[in-house]
């Protein structure tokens, strides 16, 4: 067997990592090397985000430790039965790459995942060793995200949280039935148990001892999870309902939706029921409405009889079109909760509206200056110098926002 060079391994394992949803580095503790000690930082000149065309964060050195795997999950390109080129980093090689990439100003942190080799404990042990070496031997103060393995020894996951800024544990698919069908070697109960343990350990880290000392910080940026969407027949209502329960139960920082695209060699049995990237984008928008705009799952998905989001228009606009009796809304009198439901109004815009209208009555141009998207909002609001008239109830209102029909190529 030909020995692979470090560059070849990097090409294979960085490409293999593209299926893992990355993360923003917000929420972690402040660490910096500006005092002349250590290496890297998490603030200021720390994590510098770059985004791929599909919206994924690619600012970190994002690699798999290996794409060898003993599991045969039907939706995974790196499953044991998949015919892909395999490679494996040693822990020392990952440490070397992280430090050298940082010194060249390519990256400001590490996102590390892995296939399962030998056993869950053996794989998790190597990942912890990488984080420990970076922190203790090289005084690396940059951002580290470890994608942990649920059925590994809890002591290994606890140790991982002492060195990593964020831990993530994948729930894999929206329902237990889907996990059992497409990833039979994985146990949904074990996944949830591990997520609960991480939450409890993090909560315990906030409590002071009888001497007044706090225990060592544990995963200061919290935990997140990833859910594959489109690999099973789950509706968007099911997916968002599961996300709501995850946020509530485990205090997650983020649920990442990863659009499933069929892998050419062996995914014929998986149902690709909707365009993957468009669906992923709408789910992220709906997730945002659930977390920060006061919507619930039934409101967001209730406009469609099949429980799926409208792919042609964003979820807030879809809700507004389905609830026209609530509009037009008087911007100078409406509550914050209702203003947040106006298409084209973001949370910052609503804050500016509430602050300004204490002193004077708002006009159309005021909203433009505040950053409101009046192209969307104008049909749903009234102001001192604006009323939409019959626009709100017009039969072609949705067509004004939906993308125009496109003639597809025949070749």
Image (cartoon, rainbow, N blue to C red):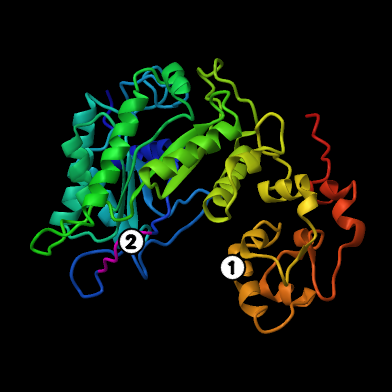
- Residue closer to the observer: 271 or 4: 271
Please report whichever mark, 2 or 1, sits nearer to the chain's N-terminal start: 2
Q: Which mark is residue 104?
A: 2
> Element at badge 1?
helix
Q: Quadrant of residue 334?
A: bottom right
Q: Quadrant of the C terminus?
A: top right
Distance from disc 2 to disc 1, alpha carbons, whole Å, reads 37 Å
Query: Would you say the magenta stretch is mainly helix, strand or loop?
Result: loop
Q: Which residues are magenta?
A: 27-32
- Residue closer to the observer: 81 or 182: 182
Residue 213 horizontal/vertical position (percent): 12, 63
Q: Quadrant of the N terminus?
A: top left
Residue 309 horizontal/vertical position (percent): 66, 38
Label 1 neighbourhood size at 10 Å, few (<14), some (14-19), many (20+)?
few
Tag 1 residue:
348
Toward the left, the furthest residue is 211
Q: Which mark is residue 259?
A: none
């Amino acid at each position: 067997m030909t020995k692979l060079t470090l560059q070849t391994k990097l090409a294979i394992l960085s490409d293999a990592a593209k299926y893992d949803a990355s993360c923003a580095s917000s929420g972690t503790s402040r660490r910096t090397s500006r005092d002349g000690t250590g290496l890297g930082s998490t603030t200021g000149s720390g994590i510098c985000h770059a985004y791929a065309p599909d919206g994924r964060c690619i600012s970190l050195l994002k690699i798999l430790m290996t794409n060898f795997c003993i599991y045969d999950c039907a939706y995974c390109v790196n499953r044991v039965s998949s015919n892909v080129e395999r490679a494996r980093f040693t822990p020392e090689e990952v440490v070397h790459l992280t430090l050298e990439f940082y010194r060249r100003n390519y990256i400001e942190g590490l996102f590390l995942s892995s296939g399962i080799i030998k056993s869950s404990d053996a794989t998790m042990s190597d990942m912890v060793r990488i984080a420990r070496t970076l922190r203790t031997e090289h005084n690396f103060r940059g951002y580290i995200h470890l994608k942990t393995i649920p059925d590994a020894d809890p002591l290994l996951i606890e140790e991982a949280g002492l060195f990593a800024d964020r831990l993530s544990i994948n729930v894999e698919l929206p329902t237990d039935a889907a996990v059992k069908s497409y990833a039979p070697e994985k146990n949904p109960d074990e996944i949830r148990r591990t997520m609960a343990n991480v939450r409890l350990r993090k909560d315990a880290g906030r409590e002071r001892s009888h001497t007044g000392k706090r225990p060592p910080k544990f995963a200061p940026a919290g935990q997140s999870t990833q859910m594959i969407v489109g690999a099973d027949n789950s509706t968007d209502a099911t997916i968002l309902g599961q996300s709501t329960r995850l946020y509530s139960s485990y205090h997650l920082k983020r649920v990442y939706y990863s659009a499933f695209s069929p892998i050419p060699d062996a995914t014929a049995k998986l149902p690709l029921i909707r365009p993957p990237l468009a669906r992923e984008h709408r789910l992220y928008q709906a997730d945002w409405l659930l977390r920060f705009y006061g919507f619930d799952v039934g409101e967001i998905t209730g406009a469609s009889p099949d429980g799926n989001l409208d792919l042609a228009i964003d979820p807030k606009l879809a809700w507004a079109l389905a609830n026209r009796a609530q509009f037009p809304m008087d911007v100078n009198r409406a509550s914050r909760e209702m203003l947040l439901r106006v298409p084209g109004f973001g949370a910052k815009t609503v804050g500016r509206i509430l602050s300004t209208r204490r002193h004077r009555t708002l006009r159309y141009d005021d909203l433009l200056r505040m950053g409101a998207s009046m192209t969307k909002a104008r049909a749903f609001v009234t102001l001192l110098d604006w009323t939409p008239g019959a626009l709100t109830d017009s039969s072609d209102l949705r067509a004004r926002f939906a993308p125009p029909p496109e003639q597809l190529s025949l070749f």
